[in-house]
Image (cartoon, rainbow, N blue to C red):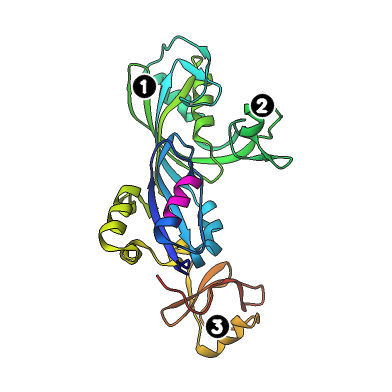
Amino acid sequence: MARRAISGILILDKPKGITSNAALQRVKRLYNAAKAGHSGSLDPVATGLLPICLGEATKFSRFLLDADKHYRVSANLGIRTETGDTEGKVISTGKVDCSLTTLQSVLENFRGNILQVPSMYSAIKYQGQPLYKLARQGITVDREAREISIYSLEILSFSENILELEVHASKGTYIRSLVDDIGEALGCGAHVLELRRLKAGPYIADQMLTLETLEQVAESEGIEALDRFLLPVESAVASMPDVKLSDSTAFYIGQGQAVIVPHAPANGWVRLKNGEHFLGIGEILEDGRVTARRLTNKVVSF
């Protein structure tokens, strides 16, 4: 059967124990989609919100990669592992002797703009190789600290060495590294027990669907019934203001020309629309004209 040219965004609740790519491939097969990609990998041990972009939506996935994220994480204080989670071997243990007051004081150092050194067990590439592949070969390389932003870091519970946190962080934040750093600051070590992503960019937990639900609907109603779960392609760039194009300016935009649009924003990125039809995204040039940066095909189906 020929692959379908279906476009839209599915908000998947990634299950524990599989990679983000494995989850993507299962969704792609379920939809029999010609093209698919995900935005923002989750570790195999992590669960939660994973946007799956189908068809035309893959053109805008980078804007979801750049979006900030919300997580709920359970950390085991007193045990540090080489991977920062339950998958790695224990490399040190320490006595946990801290109060909520101490925890709050330590966490204050991790709020705002901070520098973070990515884990060797991250997917960042070094000379073309993901760091985690090098780590599994026993190879360690220097990693440059990156500036990230922790917008909020709140304690949900703390009992019997288990600390549960809610984190709102910028792109590029590694929660395993954050927990590891907190454990080192407390002097006892720590690692991630459970990690769940609850929000990414404009998407929230209430929009998530499980693989089991998708499989049941596909089996009972057919794969076309899955299309109702797809969000519009333009939802990936929901934070951008709309610029309404006439038929003529839409034509010139499609030809790669910059156009004057009355009442357009003075600067920044915009969503280009012709009536209710989403054409893509553009940018306001210094002279006030609007130019296209990424366009959809003429016909987009959800």
- Magenta stretch encompasses residue 35: no
Residue lying at 45% horizontally and 15% vertically, measured from the top left: 78
Distance, label 2 to label 1, CA atoms, is 31 Å
Please state if 196 lies on the left or on the right of 88 as rendered: left
**Residue 106 vs residue 184, the one in the foreground:** 184
Q: Residue furthest front?
A: 1
> Where is mark 3, residue-wise?
261
Residue lying at 47% horizontally and 59% vertically, measured from the top left: 53
Magenta-colored segment: predominant secondary structure: helix
Estimate how packed mark 2 is, as few (under 14), some (14 to 19) or many (20 or more) residues with alpha carbons within 10 Å.
few
- Magenta stretch encompasses residue 24: yes
Residue lying at 53% horizontally and 36% vertically, measured from the top left: 174
> Where is mark 2, residue-wise?
137
Query: Vertically, is 115 above or below 78?
Result: below
Which label's residue is closer to the chain start, 2 or 1?
A: 2
Q: Amino acid at mark 3?
A: Val
Query: Vertically, is 23 above or below 186?
Result: below
Distance, label 2 to label 3, CA atoms, is 56 Å
Q: Residue furthest bottom?
A: 248
Q: Amino acid at mark 1?
A: Ile
Q: Secondary structure at mark 3?
A: loop
Of tags 2 and 1, the one toward the viewer is 2
Distance, label 3 to label 1, CA atoms, is 56 Å
Say the numbered circle drawn on residue 188: none
The magenta span reads 21-28
* Residue 263 % position (x, y): 51, 80
Say the numbered circle drawn on residue 162: 1
* Residue 282 % position (x, y): 58, 72
Query: Vertically, is 22 above or below 106?
Result: below
Q: Secondary structure at mark 1?
A: strand
Which label's residue is closer to the chain start, 3 or 1?
A: 1
**Residue 80 vs residue 215, the one in the foreground:** 215
